[in-house]
Amino acid sequence: LRVVVLISGSGSNLQALIDAIESNSLPGVEIALVVSNKAGALGMQRALKHKIAALYLPWRTREEWEAKLSDLLRLFQADMIVLAGFMRILSSKFIERYPQGIINLHPALIPDDGAGETYTTSDGNIIPVFRGMHAPRQALEAGVAITGSTVHYVVPEVDAGPPICRREVIIEDGDTEDSLQERIKLVEHHLIVEAIRLLQQRTS
Ligand code: GRF
């Protein structure tokens, strides 16, 4: 399975994938290329340090970016695109060209039907689905006891595709947006590896 990872920043989830591959926890999986829409993203350095091709593709227009990405996907023979902290929205035209070929990591719980507006946590509470860029903050503001993270298939609606796997994270007293985001990330580092493993099993 040849994976292309799109990032915009730190790339700690990319690092989790690199580590899993290097420790033989993901046999048959290879990171073919890392693409960043941000110059100097730490994630690119992480890739290069492990001799993985990494490219900065400046975002001028969505159309141009997606056209260039499509060329790269062909060139690097990608089987799957992973959005790992990629902060741009891809067009439905692009997404529909890769059915079940794009997955995203989102720091909130997305229900089984993907598009639903509520999620039932393991303790039986019905909570809203937090979408967009500030999901941990929204979870704190809503006063929920549990949030989490989901790896899901990308569909044209943002943060709304069917989940592949997800995990809950308990909100602690005194949690700030940063502390919660960091604890979610620790869970995500396992979740992203689990998702790729599941997908590889499904495709092989
Ligand atoms: C993660 O929390 C992910 O859920 C969100 O952006 C963050 C990326 O973190 N979409 P990193 O760049 O992998 O460290």
Image (spheres, rainbow, N blue to C red):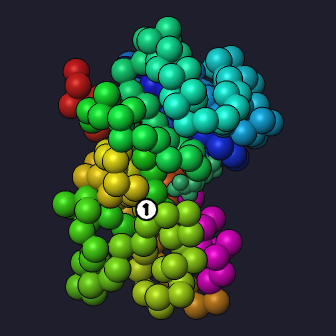
Residue that carries the numbered disc 1 in the rendered image? 149
Considering the image in quadrants, where does the C terminus appear? top left
**In the rendered structure, which amino acid carries the disc numbered 1?**
Ser
Please state the horizontal and vertical placement of residue 1, each as a whole percent of the image. Answer: 37, 20
Which residues make up the magenta segment?
175-185
Asked whether residue 178 is drawn in magenta, I would say yes
Judge whether residue 32 can be spotted in this image.
no
| Residue that sits furthest to the right in the current view | 40
* Secondary structure beneath label 1: strand
Q: Where is 89 relative to 122, above or below?
A: above
Of 91 and 155, nearer the camera is 91
Q: Where is 156 relative to 41, above or below?
A: below
Q: Where is 198 relative to 200, above or below?
A: below
Please state the horizontal and vertical placement of residue 101, each as a whole percent of the image. Answer: 32, 31
Judge whether residue 179 can be spotted in this image.
yes
Of 193 and 38, nearer the camera is 38
Asked whether residue 19 is drawn in magenta, I would say no
**Callout 1: CB less than 8 Å from ligand 1:** yes
| Residue that sits furthest to the top in the current view | 75
The residue shown at (65%, 18%) is 53
Image position of 41 (left or right of 191): right
Crowd class of label 1 (few under 14; some 14 to 19; many from 20; radius 10 Å): many
Image position of 83 (left or right of 168): right
Please state the horizontal and vertical placement of residue 91, each as a whole percent of the image. Answer: 42, 41
The residue shown at (64%, 19%) is 52
Please state the horizontal and vertical placement of residue 108, each as a whole percent of the image. Answer: 43, 67
The residue shown at (28%, 74%) is 117
Q: Where is 135 relative to 8, above or below?
A: below
